[in-house]
Every structure is written in structure tokens, then in C-alpha cells.
Amino acid sequence: MFSADLHLPPALTRRRLPCMTHDLHQTAEQTERLFLVGIQTSTMSRAQAEASLDELVRLADSTDGEIVGSTLIRVRQPRPATYIPSGAIDELAGELAALDVRTVVLDEDVTATQQRNLEERWKPAKVLMRSELILDLFARRAQTSEGKLQIELAQHQYRLPRLRGFGAMMSRIGGGIGARGPGEKELEVDRRAIMRRIQALDEKILRLRMRRETQRARRGRSTIPTVALVGYTNAGKSTLLNSLTGADAFVEDKLFATLDPTARRCRLDSGMSVVVTDTVGFINRLPTQLAAAFRATLEEVLYADVLVHVVDATSPRAEHEIEVTRNVLAELGASAIPRLTVWNKIDALEEALGAGAPTPGFIEAQHPGTIAISALERTGLDRLGQAIEDLINEARPEAWLRFDYDSYADVARIEAAGAVHEIHHLPDGIWLRASLPPDLARRFEKQVVAEPPSELAGLAAEQDGAESGAARLVAKRAPAAPSPLPAEED
């Protein structure tokens, strides 16, 4: 029915990582031995179950535990008491004892009673679910006060309905994976105390959300376009942010290496300034409590002018990861925002997928309108920058405007938004052809003219389609600074 170590990569069998056990008085170093159990339900194919277990291996590898084995169990009909068939439980019990396993991680969320019963059958190992493992990872990665509050809220919301099922088993506060985070001291308090804590956290997060709204409004007034990097976890979004902006966001080849959103300003080769934001990565079957707690953070994408969907080109499940990302964006209401799909990590294609790996050109041919890049080696970033600028301009209405010569400040404001296609100095004033963001369109609606002077209209017709990048029709402007510039805090 199952076989141990079926899905465990050889590199993980010998890996020993320190696990920090938390209590109120001291911190001791030990290794927490993990065994992963995949579940194939009646609605899943074996390939789907194996892919989900593979992802669970990656999640567990991002913790401080030592993975000593894994298996896949088929469950046609969940058992009310234990979810897993009794025969499989007994057979696995011997394997767990032989391997001295301390933690069993299920790739499924079972009830608190089922979890307690499994722990009784597999003593002394504790049992965690996929959601608890993800919660633990988030608790490890959160750095900002807002991120820590969101994690604590999600932990309480997840554990609250499960308190009754554990009863005396709440002594799991001993520590280790799944018992970590800002809220661990609350595990043994009564439901009403936890509910009061949830209410207090909601109020704190609301205040932080209001402050974030103020920051968004300030960015909106600055007229600088915003580009949000979105995608599956570990697709390389933080590396791309660093390459585009010269920032120093934390980067690690693990799931959810970064959680807290980062915003940095950069200048494209054409001279257009943009603010690039890095968002929390998506994953299949993200716990609903986490999705709700991090909704305010995820909603940053709703205020972006362009979404850059970063895809790990080396992932064998890239198409599935694309689908998960699209579904999350649809749930957030971001489907209508202009989007550019970028295939990242082309420098590692052959190493990850072997000699038959697709070439970057083949990937782009198979997926028209996308761009293949290497954020690490900065390959293709010039094409990416041009594509971002094109999308921003397409989303903004184009218009002719005329300013008096004493209105250079207004002209400079429009140029700072990277919106100018042409600029002409004529006897009657300064003439611009520009793509205006909504706030500038409203601000300068009196300067908008239906048609340019005849001499400019003729020039525009001759040059239409010929200009590219930083080329401009008239009056050479100062050359654009090379990209990227040193990071600027937004």
C-alpha cells in the first residue's frame, strides 16, 4: 500500500539541519526528524498526489528538520477516527519507530480528533498537517511587525476551532516545527482569551492597513507607475527585484524565503521611473487563514499599473504553478490589470531539466507574448524593461498638450512620470504628446488639445512607428541613466 522513502530525494536523506526548540526559559539545539505522508484521495490521480507530495518535501526542506522518509498512502474513503486506513497506520508505526521519527507531516488537513488519534497510534511522534507546516514557515520568515501580526492572527484562527479536539494534548507547546511563532504562548489558554487576542490583532492590523492606504495614496500622487512582481513561491521574484533596482532583498533557494513586501524605485533604459514591488509568493492549497490574514498585503497588486508574472522555467510543474497564480489573482480581482509573463532562471534550464531542456527561444515561441530571462545573470532585462514601458503606455490615454513657457514645472512633472513621447518648442508654447496616468489626465485636462498644429501632425505621421526606446522626434533630451540606479526607498 505504501513504501518508505518513495519520494525522498537522495540529497535529503543525509541532511541534518538544526531545529530550535522554543520554551520560556532557554533555547536548545536539536534535530527534528521528519517523515512525510502523502495522501491520494479518490478524486486525485497518482500523478497529482505525487506532485503534491513532492511539494511537501520542498516545504519540509525549507524548515530546520531532517527528512528521514516519505510515503504515499491511497485513501479511497476517509476513516472517521483516523482518516487513514488502520492497516496502513500499523504498518507505518513500525517504520516510524525504526527511524526514530519525532514528527509526521500529513499532506492533508484532518480534524483535530483524527490528528489526536494518529498521535496516539504513532507515539511518541507528533502529527502535523500541511497547513501547520506552512504556518510554521511563515512564522520563521516574517520580519516586519505587520508580517508577524498577520502570522499570529492566522495561527490563532487556525488553532481556535481545534482546541476542543486536542484537550490534554495541548501539551504540544513543548516546541519544534508547528509550535513556533508569536502566538505559541497562547496555545493552552481558553477559547475566550484567544478570541480576545484575535480581536486585538484585527485592530492592530486595521491600523497598519490604514497606514498602508496612506502610503498607496502618496505613491498615487507621485504619478510614478507601479510594477508588481507576482508568482509562485521560489520563482525568483526577489532576485529580479534586486537586479532591476539594485536593492538587497533577502534571497534564498527555499519556499517562502521572503514574506514581507518590498518596494523600490528604478529607472528604465528609456528614462521612465517606476516603483517595483515584490509580493509574497503563492502556493497550491494555501491555508485559508493565511490567505485572509495576508489579504491586505496581497492586495498591493490591485494598485499596480502592470503585473509581472514571474515563472520558474526550470520547474517541471510550471504550467500548474501558472494556473495557481492566475487563480489567486482572479480571487483578488486583479485579472484586468495588464500582465506580462516572464520565464525566469533560463541560466539553469539544462542543469535542472537535463540535456533535452527547452531553449529560451523555444519557450517564447511556445508562449507568445512572454519573455525568457535570467534575473541572476541579468539576461533579457533590457527587453523586459521595454515591455514593461510598452504595457504602461498602452494602459494610459495618449493626448496632445500645450503649455506656456512659464510652466516648465508641469512639463517636468509629466516627464518624471515617463509619459512623454514627443516634446516640441514652438513660438506659442511647449507641445507634448504623452500617455497620461489618470491623475495627470485630470490635473491637466485644460492643457489637452484635440489636434496638434499642422506642422506637428505632419511630423508625427512621418515618424509614427519609427521611434523606439529612448529615441525622441525633436529636441534631444539628456541621455537616460543606465539601469539599474541605486535603490531608492519609496
Image: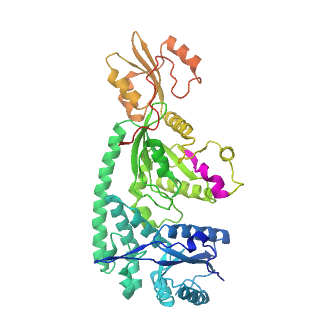
Q: Nearer the viewer, residue 131 or 374?
A: 374
Q: Position of residue 334 (x, y in %)?
A: 49, 49
**What residue is drawn where x is 43% and y is 23%?**
478
Kindly give the residue lying farthest to the right in the view shown. Answer: 356
Q: Which residue sits at x=46%, y=33%? A: 482
Which segment is the magenta one?
A: 340-353
What residue appears at the point 45 percent right and 56 percent down from the top-left corner? Answer: 280
| Residue 259 visible somewhere in the drawing | yes
Q: Is residue 342 magenta?
A: yes
Residue 107 percent coordinates (x, y): 54, 74
Residue drawn at x 49%, y 50% as measured from the top left: 239
Task: Specify the quadrant of the image occupied by residue 12.
Answer: bottom right
Q: Position of residue 320 (x, y in %)?
A: 61, 59
The quarter of the rendered structure image containing the C terminus is: top left
Where residue 87 appears, as percent x and y from the top left, is 61, 89
Return the residue found at the far top: 427
Above or below 33: residue 124: below
Answer whether residue 9 is visible to the viewer in this image: no
Vertical placement of residue 90 versus 267, above or below: below
Q: Is residue 337 magenta?
A: no
Number of disc labels = 0
